[in-house]
Amino acid sequence: MKLLLYGTILFALGCQSLKLNCESGVCQKREKLKFSRVWAKDTKLSNNLSSKKFQQAKALIHDEYVFIGNAIDSITAFDKTTGTLIWSKYIKGGVESTATAVKNILYFSANDGFFYAVDIHTGKTKWSAPIRFEGLGAPIVSGQNVYFLTGNNVLIALDRFNGQQRWIYSRTESSELTIRGASKPAILNGKLYVGFSDGAAMAFNALTGAVIWEQNLATSLKYNDVDAKPLLLGGSLYLPNYDGHLYKLNPNNGQVIWKVDVGGPSTVGFNKDLLFVSTSDSKVVAVSPETGDIKWEYKVKKGIASTPVFHKGMIVFTESDADVVALEAHTGRKLATYTTGFGVSAPVNVTDQGHVYFISRDAILWNLKLVR
C-alpha cells in the first residue's frame, strides 16, 4: 500500500516538474511551440515607396502552388515548398480578393475593374469580364457558374467557362460610411448566401438570382457592413456584422435564432465545439455554436485580428498591426507568436503539415512552420 502511495506521489511530482498538461485524466507533456521561418518572397513587380497597404487576400494552396494577390500591382504563383517563382501577372491596382482554383483555372476579382480566369500553370488569361468596379469579394465556383461580390454591392454570376454574365443583383448603398471589403458568397443546396455593406444578409436562387429571403442585421452603430463569408455549419448560418453582433440564422428563411454582442469583419472560424470570432474591438472570442455563450476572450496586441483558422487543437490568426499568433483553441492560452515587422492584415492558410502561408502588409508572402 505504501509503495503504491509513494508511486502516486512521485508520479504527481513528476507531472509538475515536467510541466505536464493533465486533462481528462491523461497527462501529456506541454511542449513549447514556435513559428519557424521557411521562406519569405516579395510579391511586388515594382518598388512601392508609399505606406504599407492593408492586404486582404488569403494565400491559396492548390496542388504544388501557392497563389497570392497584393494590393499594389500583381497576382503571383510560387512553388509552395521551395518558394520558387512560377509566374507573376501584372494587374493595375493589384488583387485584394482571395483567388479560387478549379482544376487548371484560377479565378479572381481585380482592382482594375475586371474579373479573370487564368491558367494556373502559366498565368495566361483564358478570359476576362468587365465588372466596372473594384473586385474586392472572393469568388466561389459551383456547377457552371462563378459567383462574386464587387466593392459597390453588386453580386454577379458568370459562366465559369467563358465569362458570360448569367445574372446580376445590384444593391444601393444606404450609407456613406462603410468598411472597405466585400463578402464571399456561400452556397448550399442551390441557395447562395451573401452579406452586404448596409447590413443585409440575403439568400438567392443560385441559378436564377431570384431573392429567397432578406434579413436586416444593421444596428444603430457606425458601421453595419457584413463583409464576412457566411458560415454554414450544422444546419445553421453564422454571420457577423462589423460593429454589431454575431448572428445565428435559419438558412431556410433567415430567421434569427440568437445573437451575441461580438461583431467583426472576418469570417467565423470553428472546430466541432466552438466558434472563433475576430471582433472590431480588437479581440478574438470563443463562442458556443448552440447557445451563443462566450467561453473565453483574447485581447489583440494591436489592430484587429483576421479569421482564426483551427489546426490540431489550436487557432492561428494575424494581427493587423502586430504579430502572427497561435492560441490553444479550448482555453485561448497563447502558444506562439511571430513578428514580420510590418503587421499582417490578411488571413492565414494553414496546411495539414503545419505550414502557415500569408501576405504581410509590405506585400511579402511568408511560409512559416509550426514546430515543437
Image (cartoon, helix red, strand yellow):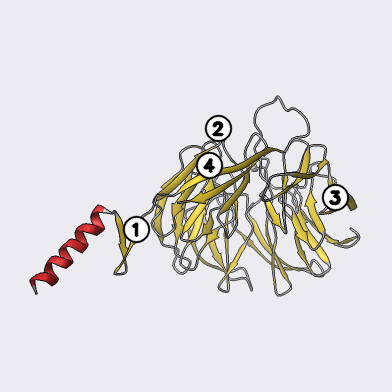
Q: Give the residue type at disc 3.
A: Thr
Type of the residue with mark 2: Gly
> What is the x, y in percent for residue 299?
43, 44
Label 1 or label 4, whichever comes before in sequence order: 1
Residue where numbered disc 1 is placed: 29
Which image quadrant for residue 73?
Answer: top right
Taking depth in this image into account, of 177 and 362 the one nearest to the observer is: 362
Q: Which mark is residue 274?
A: none
Q: Judge depth for marks 1 and 2 and give the one in front.
A: 1
Secondary element type, mark 3:
loop
Query: Disc 3 designates what residue?
Result: 122
Q: Earlier in the sequence, mark 3 or mark 2?
A: 3
The amino acid on which the numbered mark 4 sits, given as a three-letter code, is Glu
**Dot placed on the residue nearer the N-terminal end, 1 or 2:** 1
Report, in whole angstroms, how far the alpha carbon at label 1 lies from the one at label 4.
29 Å
* Residue 278 is at least partly visible in this image: no
State yes or no: discs 3 and 1 in contact (Cβ < 8 Å).
no
**Quick one: label 1, few (<14), some, or many (20+) residues within 10 Å?**
few
Residue 319 has which mark? Answer: 4
| Nearest-to-viewer mark from 3 and 4 | 3
Residue 211 visible to the viewer: yes
The answer to whether marks 3 and 4 mark residues whose Cβ atoms lie closer than 8 Å is no
Tag in front: 1 or 4: 1
Under mark 1, the amino acid is Lys
| 74 in relation to 352, above or below | above
Spatial CA distance of label 3 from label 2 is: 32 Å
Q: Image point 12% across, 69% down: which residue?
A: 5
From the viewer's perspective, tell me whether residue 116 is left or right of residue 151: right
Marks 1 and 2, how far apart in space?
Answer: 32 Å
Quick check: marks 1 and 4 in contact, CB under 8 Å? no
The answer to the question of whether label 1 and label 2 lie on touching residues, with beta carbons closer than 8 A, is no
